[in-house]
Image (cartoon, grey):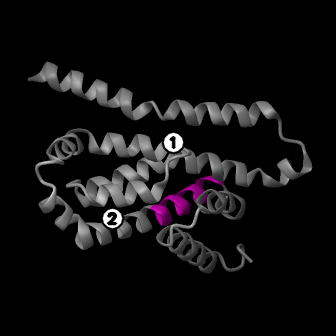
Amino acid sequence: MVVTHYIASVVLYEIVFIIAVLLFLPVTIALSLLGGFLFGVVAGTGYAVTGATLASVIIFLLVRHGIGKLFQRRYAKRIEYINSEIKRYGAWYLMVAQMLPFSPTWLLNVGAGLTRMSVWTFGWATAVGLVPGTFLYALIGQQLPTIVAGSIRHEYVIGALFVLTSLVLVPLVLKRYWDAHKDADS
């Protein structure tokens, strides 16, 4: 069906992914695996990241315009430090948190909506942070036929998990590099 109705398959996949995230259903890993299985690793990663990011931005905006502004006004003094940290490091925190396979995405979306982080920063940091894990799941999804047949090597999976874990450090290293060069230029 995917080959003969590719566009319809992609649209349906995106709709299901967005609805699952909006309803806080814990199925994004399974949907990322399915994306790799149906569309291949690159397209599956792209479609899954797009669906997850769109849904995350919707949740972010609902929280921001629902209770986020009230939260900011009501607890302005208490959360001053958090707002300054979000302004300075928010994108980096969000990217690292999104890269961690065990972090609850819904909590990140709601929590960020309560802060002063811009929608643009939230969107790109979420998308970038989702890529490594989603890529790994799509890669495994693409390999499902060989995994079921028992022909995949354990080193392959261990290597992929090692790469994913290592990628969590990339935003932190980049931030340090950025700060060091920014301070040197001043």
Q: CA distance from mark 1 to mark 2?
A: 19 Å
Q: Main secondary structure of the magenta part?
A: helix
On the image, numbered disc 2 is attached to which residue? 60
| Quadrant location of the N terminus in the rendered image | bottom right
Question: Label 1 sits on what residue type?
Answer: Leu
Dot 1 falls on a residue whose secondary structure is loop
> As drawn, is 159 to the left or to the right of 99?
right
Question: Which residue is located at x 15 percent, y 19 percent?
Answer: 184
Q: Residues within 10 Å of mark 1 (few under 14, many from 20)?
A: some
Q: Position of residue 21 (x, y in %)?
A: 50, 67
> Does the stretch in magenta take in 69?
no
Instruction: Choose top left, top right, bottom left or bottom right for residue 85.
Output: top left
x and y percent of residue 15 in the render? 53, 76
Which sits earlier in the primary sequence, circle 1 or circle 2? Answer: 2
Name the quadrant of the C terminus: top left
Three-letter residue code for mark 2 = Phe
Circle 1 is placed at which residue position? 100
Along the line of sight, the residue nearer the viewer: 74 or 81: 74
Note whether 13 is above or below 111 in the view shown.
Answer: below
- Residue drawn 27% across the image and 53% down it: 121
Look at the image and say whether residue 43 sits in the magenta stretch. Answer: yes
Q: Secondary structure at mark 2?
A: helix
Report whether 102 appears left or right of 181. Answer: right
**Which portion, as a residue range, is magenta?**
41-52
Q: Residue at x 54, y 63 (%)?
A: 47
